[in-house]
Amino acid sequence: MNITRRRFLSMSGAIGSGVALSSLGLDLTALTAHAAGLGKMDRIRTAKQTISICCYCSVGCGLICSTDRLTGKIINIEGDPDHPISEGSLCSKGAGIFGLTEANPKRLRKVLYRAPKSDKWEEKDWNWTLQRIARLIKDTRDADYIVKNDKGELVNRVETIAHYGSSNIGNEECWTLSVALRALGLVNIDHQARV
Amino acid sequence: MAPPTLGGEDLALELEKLATTRPHLQTLVKAFGPLILEKAQWLADTAVDRPTVAIDRERLAAGIAVGQQLSLFAVSDPWGSAGWSVAKAITEGFPSLGGDMEIILRCFTEGNYDFFGQFFAGDDDDAERQFDRQAGELGVTPMSLHFFLRSLHHTMLAKKSRDLAPLLEGLSWKKGYCPICAALPYVAILGENGQRSLHCADCGHSWPFPRLTCPSCEHEDPQNSNLLFIDECKEEAAFFCEKCHGYLLTATRSAHIAPFHPDLVALGMVHLDLIMQEKGYSPMARSEWNGFDKAGEAQQE
């Protein structure tokens, strides 16, 4: 004798509703106090989960970003296990992508400048900083610009300035930088992620 | 290969640890611990019956679970030992039900009551109505009988799940309900690479399921896929869906680093059950211990 499928579903439905804890005579005071305490101490958080793509390279690994629904700030980023390419895996750069967010307490928030031969960092504003960088680049480029090489071939390049890309710049930023740097004539261009 | 799970003495130790490290759970661990331990022990002591049936792969791929294709239970299943084991565990965990369990145990010992025939193979389509009638005949409360039958049903389903699992290997299952018994999950585990495994509330079978899809309504909009967690404890959360207002306890665990038992994982997060139900969400499936009928009422006690 076997149970019929109809009976199985009827049984599952009838007993699926379970038994209320209160009817089992359990004292839930400690549990309810604990849950209430978490609420009173404002420790309950809710987050929205959205999918995104890692910004770093052309592989395009999938990410799941959790955003605090109260503050709107990202609280976690992890690999997306359902992404067809990366299946949840991330390289060391991708795994550290949460460090790019403002939740990272060590992230620089102001420009720091250390003058030649100084052992101290000074805070500077962006106007001063951008002008200083532009001035140094312009002066160096003007002084060292090479129009033709030893063979008389047209090269239009600067060999005395190098650019080293940060590991924290994404695909589109890398492309923009690359175009801008080549427009200046730079040939020594590298990226941390290649190392 | 299935990840290692806790059993035997390790399971008992983990239960003790849970009660020690989370004192608010002591009552529930004391009550439900014997059921968890007995079920694990009964499964370990019961022989594996290799399935002799074939699953219709096309129907499975279409979302028709094994239990909807085949008869899962048979009179030849070890109902006696399972019933004995369940009644013993309930007596230990719930002394107030001891009298009723004694009557039920006597039925098994004396063999004068056909539990299988009355409940699992009965012809009354309204099983709930039948509970009340049979409880009166047995001389136990309907609640005791309900609790006993639910636990017995889950214990036997766990055996069926274990025995039938090899048939499902390599087969695709994309639904949020269990491929064995069609019940919804009571807990999800985020394992290696964050892959989400759902654990069936009735038979304990586990299967992979997309992270941002609601297992209950299969809604996929990330805007409605949310997590509730306690600050500084992000590895334990409740996934909740704004569309169907269901929630699912979700924990990050690696079985290869530390074997776990899904019942203990879910029991350890029961405070999240309470919080979610107070917020008006419903568990996707009722576990043995998440039945807060009126969460607000429980607060006032």
Image (cartoon, helix red, strand yellow):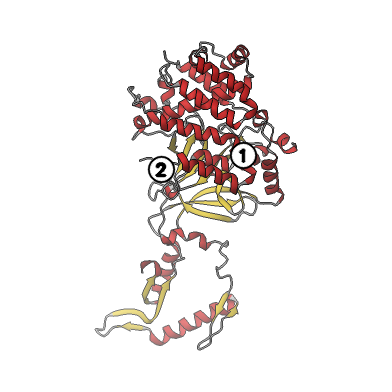
- Image position of B145 with respect to B218: above or below: above
Residue type at mark 1?
A: Asp
Question: Which quadrant of the rendered structure holds the N terminus of chain A?
Answer: top left
The residue located at (36%, 31%) in the rendering is: B168
Chain letter, disc 1 residue: B
* Mark before the other along the chain sequence, 2 or 1: 2
Tag shown at residue B273:
1
Q: Which residue is mark 2?
A: B4
Can see residue A184? yes
> Where on the picture, by quarter, is residue B149?
top right
Residue B107 place in picture, x, y as percent: 53, 16
Is residue A55 in view? no
**How far separated are the C-alphas under marks 2 and 1?**
26 Å
Q: Amino acid at mark 2?
A: Pro
Q: Position of residue B37 (x, y in %)?
A: 50, 35
Chain of the residue displaying label 2:
B
Residue nearest the viewer, comparing A74 with A135? A74
Quick one: SS at disc 2? loop
Image-quadrant location for residue B130: top right
Question: As rendered, which of B153 and B100 lies closer to the eye?
Answer: B100
Say which of marks 2 and 1 sits in front.
2
Determine crowd level at label 2: few under 14, some 14-19, many 20+ residues with C-alpha closer than 10 A. some
Callout 2 touching callout 1 (CB < 8 Å) = no
Seen from the viewer's position, the closer of residues A143 and B158 is B158
Query: x%, y% of residue A191?
Result: 39, 69
In the image, taking residue A61 as reference, residue B29 lies left or right, namely right
Residue B53 falls in image quadrant: top left
| Residue B46 place in picture, x, y as percent | 40, 28
Residue at 62 percent of width and 18 percent of height: B140
Numbered disc total: 2
| B55, above or below A99, in the image | above
